[in-house]
Image (cartoon, helix red, strand yellow):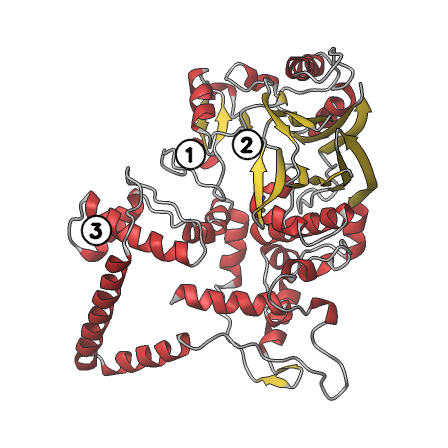
Amino acid sequence: KWTKLQRHALHVLSVSESLVYQVRYENLLKDNAATMEGINEFMGKRKFGKVLRRGSVAILNKVEDMMNTATGGVGAQQASVLSYQFKNLTRGESFRQGQFQKWRKEMNEDDILLIESVAHEMMTRLGYEPHIVGVTRDALVFTDEQIEEFKVLNELGIKKMMEDLQQENPEDAKRRIIQKTVLEQDAVMLSSTDDENGESDVDEEDEFDDGEDKIKKMHPYKWPRGASKVGYLTDEQVSERFQVKETSVLKSGKFSIKYSVAMQRGYYPSNLDKPCQDAFLDSNYLEMQWLCVFDGHGPTGHDCAEYARDNVINNYNGVAMSKDAIGASLLNVNKGLHGSDIDDSNSGTTALTVLVKGGELLVANVGDCRCVVVSLVDGKLIATALTSDQTPHRKDELERIKKAGGLVMTSEQYDNDEPMHENWLDGDSPPRIWHPNRKEGKFPGCAFTRSIGDQNGEGIGVTADAEFSKYTLSDKDQFLLIGSDGIFEFISDAEAARICSLYDDPIEVCRALVGESYRRWIKREERTDDITVIAGFISKDD
């Protein structure tokens, strides 16, 4: 029932965000009185076109409780991951114990696996990407006959429950019947038309039809126009943070790549003037095109990223496209950064370098930036990642760090606010790398396993050794994407491919990807990371 309600609400929200009033912690903290006044106004009589809404219901905790939670840190972090726990169907020991107490009976591993597998099947059919945590086996796979049997048993169980409820609590039974009737109704949008004054409540630019052009009409190439509707900043403020490079064309063997680059400085409420720590490189050297993205972190992260950008070519000693040469260059950049005036003890940068020549791509990756080639195969878009994020989520990287003596845990686990486990999920507080000697302090806290800089992490496994991949362009290849985790933190490779396919100009793709990334960051984090993307259209020359 909860899922069905959410689907209704999401449908309404996707068509007209003006129908939903969002209350944010930041608003409450900045101007409590004005925020509450806005809530009260929204709940009163209000027109949407010719539809008059006579009342609304809002469930709020006491303002003091909300503010205490917002400033408490741990409470806010716990609240921020609740939706992810549902989306990923997180289940672990706490779930097991909770169900024991609720049902007051022992459950063995098979019982839990069966329950989880049924839920896994349902959530998968609804389009989620669930995981099962706390059991050692994969989810059970059900046959169509078994699913039909489940339906019958479920209907019989509900029928028996309702019969008992009619005898034990007729009022509750009546309420459930009404609730069932409401939930079974299809979601219907109320049309918004001009009111008596001729004014429409929904901007024409916000309206769109479901289907092929949904993303395109939600996030048009005009970004950052409309940015104020999805975040705290005005269009003008976002424009000041945003830059896009004019389209260029590079020749590579029998192929041409028409590409553009866009970058947007992040939004941090506690540090509005924080400099952009991303950097990119678009240069030609030794008849090779260098397309690179650097994502800095730490107090001097912006300086580290710019240092890597300015020195990666200078340290290239090869005469052709060479894995050994680009790997050595990145190591030399790391060494040079250590010896520079930049304090990189707890700062550094990721580095993704893509060399393009003769229809070949050579990818060298240090960190968690990402390179993706999108191909059209049998009428379907296929996204192929040429990099693998180097984080503790990868078992091989996790074991490498542990073998080097590093501690791997979330910040909450380090502070003993959460129990120790290694079932970290994307979207939760990330696992980080810590020095084993706690007496020396809580550092370095890297959420990645490889980087340039981060001197304090080198002794516990953090390295500038790159991972490599090669790719030969083919007639089926359509798009090339190179981006920081500001893009790929909340946009999957497949979603990025879909967005690319909606446009016929790389500048428009860059704007759309940045706009969509910004929207998702604001909704999930109430801040945004720096966002950088290089988007290219691949075509074969005649």
Residue drawn at point x = 55 percent, y = 49 percent: 71
Under mark 3, the amino acid is: Phe
Residue 376 % position (x, y):
61, 45
Task: Describe residue 500's horizontal placement relative to residue 78 as left or right.
Answer: right
Residue 389 disc label = 2
Q: Secondary structure at mark 1?
A: helix
Identify residue for label 3. 100
How crowded is the residue under tag 2: few (<14 C-alpha within 10 Å), some, or many (20+)? some
Instruction: State which mark lies toward you, 1 or 3.
Output: 3
Residue drawn at point x = 15 percent, y = 53 percent: 105
Q: Earlier in the sequence, mark 1 or mark 3?
A: 3
Residue 114 seen from this side:
yes
User: Residue lying furthest front in this view?
Assistant: 542
Under mark 2, the amino acid is: Asp
User: What is the quadrant of the N terminus in the image?
Assistant: bottom left
User: What is the quadrant of the C terminus in the image?
Assistant: top right
Residue drawn at point x = 42 percent, y = 67 percent: 4
Residue 413 disc label = 1
Q: Secondary structure at mark 2?
A: loop
Give the Cα distance between marks 1 and 3: 25 Å
